[in-house]
Amino acid sequence: TGGGVLLNAATGNIEFGVNHLPINGSVSAVVSDGSGGWYIGGTFTNVGAEPRKNLAHIRSDGSLTGWNPGADLSVTAMAISGDTVYIAGYFTTVAGSARSRAAAISTSGVLLPWNPNANAEVLALAVSGSTVFAGGSFTEIGGGTQARLAALDATTGNLAGGHLNPFVSGEVRALTISGT
């Protein structure tokens, strides 16, 4: 199956469709595209026979789209809001431009100016309205000192007004949103 596999939600069985695309590496993050397909991130160089550097978009029928921004190192987390896909991980460049461990890409594949510029790994993301929450091992992100957990403006990538400043002594590896 390669580094990722589609499972049937009702049966749990592996779905081997006509367009099954083996991934030569590992998949660490998946977000729905809202149309039955998925944006995937991880540590891989090919999806099927097509080169894809750690990022890809797979349609609902299992075929690969042309979305191919590429990240130089692993993608560990993804979140989507509208037509923006937020990515995080160990990378320092996306689509050939400097992006230190967090970036935003349009669903059409264009790298967006959002650049929180973390000083260490960003390992988790969650989006709520105009705020992107980031967790990881960083101590600086979004233009300020913020240890391991941050609330970022979804447009600028700067620390959000009234941002969090909790004491977090270790890496944050998972985030979710519950209500407000």
Image: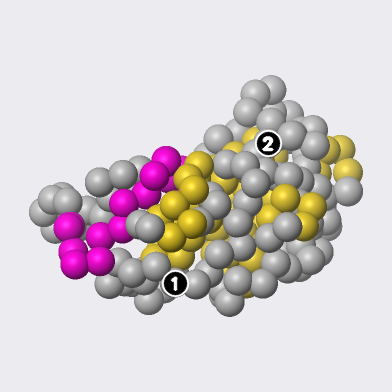
* Tag 2: amino acid: Glu
Q: Quadrant of the C terminus?
A: bottom right
* SS assignment at label 2: loop
In this picture, residue 98 sits left or right of residue 90: right
* SS assignment at label 1: loop
Q: Is residue 167 magenta?
A: no
Residue at the (65%, 39%) spot, across then down: 90
Q: Identify residue for label 1.
A: 65
* Tag 1: amino acid: Thr
Question: Can residue 130 be seen here?
Answer: no
Q: In this picture, which residue range is highlighted in magenta?
A: 15-31
Q: CA distance from mark 2 to mark 1?
A: 28 Å
Q: Identify residue for label 2.
A: 121
Indicate whether 12 appears above or below 26: below
In this picture, residue 116 sits left or right of residue 59: right
Q: Is residue 16 magenta?
A: yes
Q: Quadrant of residue 160?
A: bottom right
Residue 116: percent from left, percent from top: 79, 52
Residue 73: percent from left, percent from top: 62, 42
Local crowd size for mark 1, using a 10 Å CA cut-off: few (<14), some (14–19), many (≥20): few
Residue 76: percent from left, percent from top: 54, 43
In front: mark 2 or mark 1? 1
Question: Can residue 157 be seen here?
Answer: yes
In this picture, residue 72 sits left or right of residue 56: right
